[in-house]
Amino acid sequence: MNKLRRAFLKNAGVVGTVAIAIAAALLKPVTVFAATWNSRAFTSKNPADAINNSGYGGATESSDILIKAPDIAENGAVVPISATSNIRGTTSMAIFVEKNPTPMIADFKFSNGAEPYISTRIKMAKTSIVRVSVKAGGINYTNSREVKVTIGGCGG
Amino acid sequence: MAEAMKMRATMEGGIVDVKVLIQHDMETGLRKDTKTDKLIPAHFINQVIATLNGKIVLDAQWGIGIAKNPFIGFRIKDAKPGDKVGINAVDNLGTKFDGEVVVS
């Protein structure tokens, strides 16, 4: 019985090593893919898919993400927005407009002394929740605010 | 394509404030040509990398929701006047847009 158990454990060890080798082999293409454009996230049509496909799913609501945007945007084609994360260790920030045809707007990764701050101008099809999500220490955080749009900026 | 990009990098209280403006139509692929009634193909900048003295400080991916003639502002600490801030952007058709500015 003991011998059998030992043999089993030995085999389990081998299987484990193989699994790690396969995982390592699988990891390689994933890291290469990370540098290419995340078309899956950017073409997702509903906000939940866009958020999950971009790796910002399961986020905790946090008021430490400050979003500056107009309450009412007269022209949805150009809506100024800036966001700052006061969460320590923030490494990236993404912007989503939930009612846009494709909600994912952008994903910014910070390194080598870049502050967790972004200012840009986005397109909004109509009045929508604008969501800013960040990654910090392997945890996702998010905050949002509504921007009312009087003239939409997507499509014809 | 240097004239397609305007950049400014100024020191503000120990932090460099960078502002970048790129001339680009940022076509979503969802807009119709009013004359032909056909969709105008998507044409937009989808990747932007910013560097400080050659080191990557910002690595961005964009979708179709960034406004026409994109503006981007960001901040870098541990920089000083004379440092170089570079931008390398590329659109979905492979056209590249590069720019560089000296921190003042």
Image: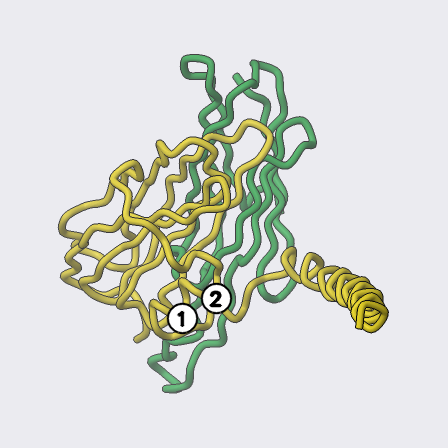
- The answer for how far apart the CA atoms under marks 1 and 2 are is 6 Å
What amino acid does circle 2 point to?
A: Asn
Identify the residue under disc 1: A49
What amino acid does circle 1 point to?
A: Asp
Q: Residue at x 38, y 58 (%)?
A: A58
Identify the hue of chain A: yellow
Quadrant where the N terminus of chain A sits is: bottom right
Q: Residue at x 24, y 59 (%)?
A: A76
Whether pointer 1 and pointer 2 mark residues with C-beta atoms closer than 8 Å, the reply is yes
Circle 2 residues within 10 Å: few <14, some 14–19, many ≥20: some
Identify the hue of chain B: green
Identify the residue under disc 2: A53
Asked if both marks, 1 and 2, belong to the same chain, the answer given is yes
From this view, report whether residue B12 is shown above or below residue A154: above
Q: Residue at x 71, y 59 (%)?
A: A32
Q: Can you name the residue that lies furthest to the front here?
A: A1
Residue B46 position by quadrant: bottom right
From this view, report whether residue A2 is shown above or below residue B14: below
Position in image of residue A61 (x %, y %):
28, 48
Q: Secondary structure at mark 2?
A: helix
Q: Residue at x 37, y 40 (%)?
A: A119
Quadrant where the C terminus of chain A sits is: bottom left
Chain letter behind tag 2: A
